[in-house]
């Protein structure tokens, strides 16, 4: 199952020096998760300090555990949202489409 993790550094609570002290460990952990196939893609946010990751995990608990293993998350230096993803219904045959939980007029 795929998930999007949207994180924001809590720059209002922590200094640049505090983030810098853990950034190499953060990058190393992300590389490990990428190597293990958990992180499929990662992007830097351009609106605020943070990242967006595409995760491949068995379930939401596994996705949360992966993100929680990041050094900045362990130190509560991040605000994180995890969103579950499903197939886009317009690309599936009608008989295989899952019911949508929110109607955004896109299906």
Image (tube, rainbow, N blue to C red):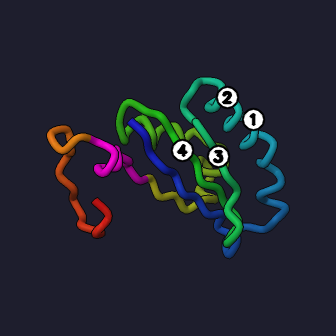
The answer to which of 14 and 91 lies nearer the viewer is: 91
User: What residue does disc 2 label?
Assistant: 32
At which x and y percent is residue 62?
Answer: 42, 35
Instruction: Name the side, left or right, on which 95 lies relative to 86.
Output: left
Q: Is residue 2 above or below residue 82?
A: above
- Residue at coordinates 67% horizontally, 28% vertically from top-left? 32
Q: CA distance from mark 3 to mark 2?
A: 13 Å
Q: Do the residues under discs 4 and 3 have CB atoms within 8 angstroms?
A: yes
* Other residues around mark 4 within 10 Å, as few (<14) / some (14–19) / many (≥20): many
- Residue at coordinates 15% horizontally, 40% vertically from top-left? 95
User: What residue does disc 4 label?
Assistant: 54
Q: Do the residues under discs 1 and 2 have CB atoms within 8 angstroms?
A: yes
* Other residues around mark 2 within 10 Å, as few (<14) / some (14–19) / many (≥20): few
User: What residue does disc 3 label?
Assistant: 42
Q: Quadrant of residue 39?
A: top right
**Label 3 vs 1, first from the N-terminus:** 1
Q: Quadrant of residue 2?
A: top left
């Amino acid at each position: 199952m795929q998930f999007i993790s949207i994180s924001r550094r809590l720059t209002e609570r922590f200094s640049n020096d505090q983030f810098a002290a853990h950034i190499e460990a953060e990058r190393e952990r992300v590389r490990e998760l990428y190597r293990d196939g958990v992180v499929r893609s990662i992007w830097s946010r351009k609106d605020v300090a943070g990242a967006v990751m595409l995760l491949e995990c068995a379930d939401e608990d596994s996705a949360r555990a992966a993100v929680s293993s990041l050094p900045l998350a362990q130190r509560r230096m991040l605000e994180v949202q995890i969103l579950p993803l499903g197939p886009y219904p317009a690309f599936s045959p009608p008989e295989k489409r899952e019911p949508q939980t929110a109607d955004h007029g896109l299906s």
